[in-house]
Amino acid sequence: MDVLAQACTAVASVVLIAVFPLEAFLVDRPWVQRFLGIEPHGIAHVHLWSFCIGARNALAGVGGLVGLWIVNRGDETVGTAVVVTVLTYMLLSSLAMAVADLLGYWLPRGGSVRGTVASSVLPAVALVSLAL
């Protein structure tokens, strides 16, 4: 696995782990809502979902780091399979934000663009790098 794919995977994984506390525990804070690009109305009603999304993202981040560890310390083929699986999850779940926005579920509408782009670029670059 090349350095670019490993670097993109590592950064994307660390970002997902770092954002977990914001989504899971601090989503009711105005500065977190601004950072995540979400409306403050009804946060109490979606905290369950934001906690679950945060936990899933953190698990994906841990999975990415474990995959990299396996690549560099164990079996490169198995580690690459883990990394590709995690990167695919990261990319598709990120693109789900854009679909939710297109369906009108994101308020304010268009609010997912920054997050979708930010969370899609690194997994996409890593997957393309692995494919070449």
Image (tube, grey):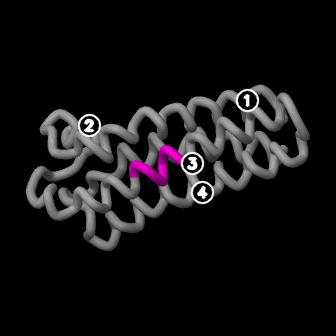
Pointer 3 local density, CA inside 10 Å: few below 14, some 14–19, many at least 20: many
Name the amino acid, label 1: Leu
Q: Which residue is mark 1?
A: 4
Q: Residue furthest bottom?
A: 103
Q: Quadrant of the N terminus?
A: top right
Name the amino acid, label 2: Phe
- Circle on res. 106: none
Q: Which residue is mark 2?
A: 35
Look at 56% across and 51% down and name the residue there.
90
Residue 130 image-quadrant placement = top right
**Image marks 2 and 3: residues in contact by CB distance under 8 Å:** no
Judged from the image, the secondary structure of the residue bearing numbered disc 2 is: helix
Q: Is residue 52 above or below residue 27?
A: below
Name the amino acid, label 3: Ala
Q: Is residue 65 above or below residue 108?
A: above
- Give the spatial CA distance, label 4 vs label 3: 8 Å
The magenta stretch is: 54-59
User: For the residues carrying marks 2 and 3, which lies nearer the camera in this image?
Assistant: 3
Pointer 4 local density, CA inside 10 Å: few below 14, some 14–19, many at least 20: some
**Image marks 1 and 4: residues in contact by CB distance under 8 Å:** no
Q: Image check: 75 left or right of 3?
A: right
Give the mark, 4 or 3, whose residue is nearer the N terminus. Answer: 3
Judged from the image, the secondary structure of the residue bearing numbered disc 4 is: helix
User: For the residues carrying marks 1 and 4, which lies nearer the camera in this image?
Assistant: 4
Give the mark, 1 or 2, whose residue is nearer the N terminus. Answer: 1
Give the mark, 1 or 3, whose residue is nearer the N terminus. Answer: 1
Q: Which residue is mark 4?
A: 89
Q: Is residue 98 above or below residue 32?
A: below
